[in-house]
């Protein structure tokens, strides 16, 4: 027998067959969320955060962006970072300065996304370094992670690719140098020093995987920051949530347990994921927490360097509350206002790279630059 159905007919049949199952599965996930979310609140793993009002602070936001365009079988890339400084006095906002960094070159296709991510981290730290030296702000937001994930380490088997290892080495050196020179003047080591906050990482599963540990035992409790009080009696009820979490999915689960103006308990990322780099920064302690600035915003993962007892619940609530108050615009890409303003500066990168690419193509056709370089070659030899 031959089949003569169009795609539209096949889609109509499949939608009728799978609709009841899809609806039933989603309803089960909603019931699991409604059952488990209150347990996280009672256990102290999810807690409300008060936002300051009025706001009086100086803050900086650092945004990064990269763009590529094809040329002669490869790519040209532009990587840029911008910093915007804000002064907030009794909720009145004014700009207080800016800074930027840019890098333009050609790049191979292999590992380009990871290499550009490393470049973004390095440029963000370069701008943060100048902000700390110039004492620009009390709170400095980076839209990149503060430390490198182990997956960013270049594989030893790719010895012929020099660009990626060089980018990794440069980024690692920049991060190591920043914390070695400045950590004593930064919060929490210096109570009046600036706070470095990383907002980029989207690893939603960190607090979920910590919750799946037996937090009544020492190995499980070591992941939660000791200064964060949790109810050990209620933690026993979380032993059976693993199946619910796996059924719902980590991203959807975090959406379900976090309401407006709430955060999770802080957890030690260097215990949860110990193979982060650079090692000297990880040794200082790396903590993370998920927060949601409003009903229309997406949950975000905040990274901070340091450990207990310097990082207390009061200090974390203050930083998260201020971050929420500065997130004035909702949506999936909601970020604190200084980061949003810095992102606007980066919109010029794409059009500029297209213009640069056309200039490169034009010069390659004319070959005038090559002629200038080789003009005195015969005389020199």
Image: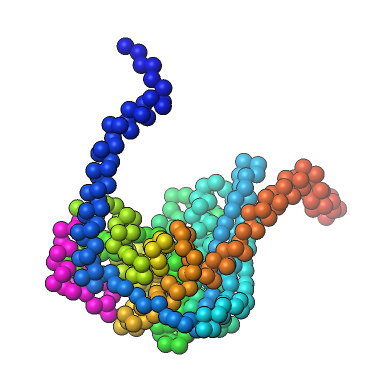
**Residue sticking out furthest to the top:** 1
Report whether residue 174 is seen. no
> At 37% from the left edge and 29% from the top edge, which residue is drawn?
11
What residue appears at the point 59 percent right and 53 percent down from the top-left corner?
A: 67
Give the magenta range: 218-242
Instruction: Say above or below: 204 vs 19.
Output: below
Say whether residue 18 is magenta. Answer: no
Say above or below: 76 vs 193. above
- Camera-side residue of 63 and 8: 8
Q: Residue at x 65, y 44 (%)?
A: 71
In the displayed structure image, the side of residue 316 where residue 95 appears, left or right: right
Tell me where residue 86 appears, x and y as whole percent. Answer: 57, 77
- Residues 376 and 348: in front is 348
Instruction: Evaluate whether residue 341 shows in this view.
Output: yes
Asked if residue 214 lies left or right of residue 46, the reply is left
Q: What residue is drawn where x is 39% and y is 80%?
A: 318
Front-most of residues 210 and 375: 210
Q: Is residue 365 above or below residue 300?
A: above
221 sits left or right of 280 in the view = left
């Amino acid at each position: 027998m031959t089949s003569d159905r169009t795609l539209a007919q096949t889609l109509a049949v499949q939608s009728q067959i799978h609709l009841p199952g899809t609806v039933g599965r989603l309803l089960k996930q909603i019931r699991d969320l409604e059952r488990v979310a209150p347990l996280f609140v009672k256990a102290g793993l999810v807690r409300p955060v008060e936002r300051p009002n009025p706001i009086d602070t100086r803050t900086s936001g650092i945004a990064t962006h990269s763009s590529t365009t094809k040329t002669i079988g490869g790519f040209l890339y532009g990587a840029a970072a911008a910093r915007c400084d804000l002064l907030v006095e009794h909720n009145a906002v004014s700009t207080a300065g800016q800074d930027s960094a840019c890098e333009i070159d050609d790049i191979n296709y292999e590992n380009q996304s990871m290499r550009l991510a490393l470049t973004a981290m390095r440029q963000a730290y370069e701008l943060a370094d100048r902000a700390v030296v110039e004492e620009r702000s009390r709170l400095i937001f980076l839209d990149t992670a503060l430390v490198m994930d182990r997956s960013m380490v270049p594989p030893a088997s790719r010895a012929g690719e020099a660009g990626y290892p060089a980018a990794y080495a440069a980024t690692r050196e920049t991060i190591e140098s920043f914390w070695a020179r400045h950590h004593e003047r930064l919060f929490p080591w210096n109570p009046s020093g600036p706070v470095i906050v990383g907002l980029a990482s989207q690893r939603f599963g960190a607090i979920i995987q910590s919750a799946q540990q037996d937090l009544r035992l020492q190995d499980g409790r070591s992941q939660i920051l000791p200064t964060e009080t949790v109810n050990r009696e209620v933690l026993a009820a979380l032993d059976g949530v693993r199946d619910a979490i796996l059924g719902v999915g980590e991203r959807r689960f975090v959406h379900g347990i976090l309401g407006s103006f709430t955060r999770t308990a802080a957890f030690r990322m260097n215990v949860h994921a110990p193979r982060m780099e650079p090692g000297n920064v990880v040794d200082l302690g790396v903590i993370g927490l998920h927060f949601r600035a409003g009903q229309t915003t997406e949950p975000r993962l905040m990274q901070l360097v340091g450990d207990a007892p310097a990082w207390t619940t009061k200090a974390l609530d203050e930083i998260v509350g201020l971050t929420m108050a500065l997130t004035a615009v909702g949506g999936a890409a909601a970020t604190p206002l200084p980061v949003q303003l810095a992102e606007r500066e980066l919109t010029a990168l794409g059009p500029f790279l297209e213009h640069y690419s056309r200039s490169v193509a034009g010069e390659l056709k004319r070959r005038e630059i090559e002629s200038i370089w080789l003009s005195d070659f015969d005389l020199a030899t």
